[in-house]
Amino acid sequence: MSSGLFDKFKSGKPGAGANKGASKFGKDSAAKPTLGTRPTQATSSFGSRTTPTSTFGTRASSLGAKREMNEATFVAYRDFIYKQSGIYFTENKKYLLEGRVSKRLEAHNMTDYNEYLQFISSPLNMRKELQSLFEVITINETYFFRNEPQFHALQNVILPELIQKKQSSPIKKIRLWSAACSSGEEPYTMAMILKEHFVAKYPSIRFEVVANDISTAVLNKARAGVYNDYAVRNVPPDLKAKYFKKDGDKWIIAQELRNLVRFSHLNLYDGNALRTIGTVDVIFCCNVLIYFDQDSKKQVVQNLFDRLEKNGFLMIGYSESLHGITKAFKLVHFPKTLAYKKE
């Protein structure tokens, strides 16, 4: 969710009136008890499309008027989004949710929050419109080599350790996973490190980067591989010259890096869908857990744990911690950063 994926805001446990639910995109019945369990099924009712002026209503009287959710509407949206993705909006972020959802109201020429909620709750509209909703409620801000100490640890310690183990293994493959890749800067940084330091040096080992996001819009940007000056500002000049082509005010990623990365759409809350990733040796899931409440964090971390190979490493954001979420990992310290190892 990279932070690339999300702007940061604090998550909290649902209070009175919040109806948590398991994702409709699938359940992971194999979740380990030590990492928590899924929230119970939501019971909210969103009414019918024919009653857009129900008690959930809004104060908006026209498309151009300022929209404001009443408390019941906010709780209904909060629970619906939580049920679909595990993302939880605390009450002090109500204004953020209002502003972001209002963009979808405008897209559909609607004036009422409840009308849109009924629209997106319909099975006929849900799957397609959910993608658009996720794209407006998540903010994608990232750049190449964003968390340099983590990439130094990957290059100087983690990958050499994994390579040493893989050389004596019958399966000589190392897979890195950017588990909330946003517009692709993080997985392409991984690919750059692999290409620059390991691929040619260890021809018997197959290297691969898998990358996913909940937003199809940012995935399209990632596949296009076109970036502005801000995104590449931390790329060393020699690597920029080697792995990018300058085109006006844009930087285009080299094909040799594209060949190392496989992008796909994925919801980290969906344990069944995550099985399509297979197993990986390193996971970067930075600035994503801050988006979830405690129960959702436990579920997402369990999903990540299940995808990680033995002796694999999980990287999370500086402001994040697995304290109180799981004891399944060993905490490993590196210069100016840390990681969680599955032993």
Image (cartoon, grey):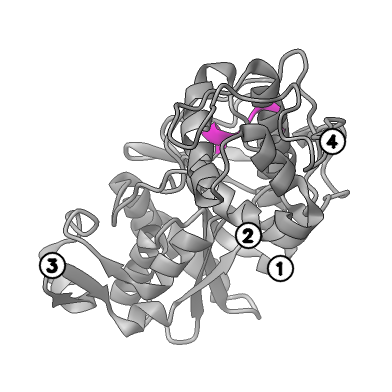
Q: Are marks 1 and 2 in contact (CB under 8 Å)?
A: yes
Q: Are marks 1 and 3 in contact (CB under 8 Å)?
A: no
- In the rendered view, tell whether residue 125 sits above or below residue 252: above
Q: Position of residue 300 (x, y in %)?
A: 67, 43
> Which residue lies at the image location 57% right of the left edge and 25% below the top edge?
11
- Label 4: which residue? 33
Compare residues 50 and 187 and report the one nearer the observer.
Answer: 50
Q: Is residue 145 left or right of residue 75?
A: left
Q: Is residue 138 left or right of residue 73?
A: left
Label at residue 249? 3
Label at residue 276? 1
Alpha carbon separation for disc pair 4 and 2 = 24 Å
Which three-letter amino acid code belongs to the residue tagged 1? Thr
Residues drawn in magenta = 289-295
Which three-letter amino acid code belongs to the residue tagged 3? Asp
Closer to the chain start, of discs 1 and 4, is 4
**Crowding at mark 4 (Cα within 10 Å: few <14, some 14-19, many 20+):** few
Q: Residue furthest top?
A: 16
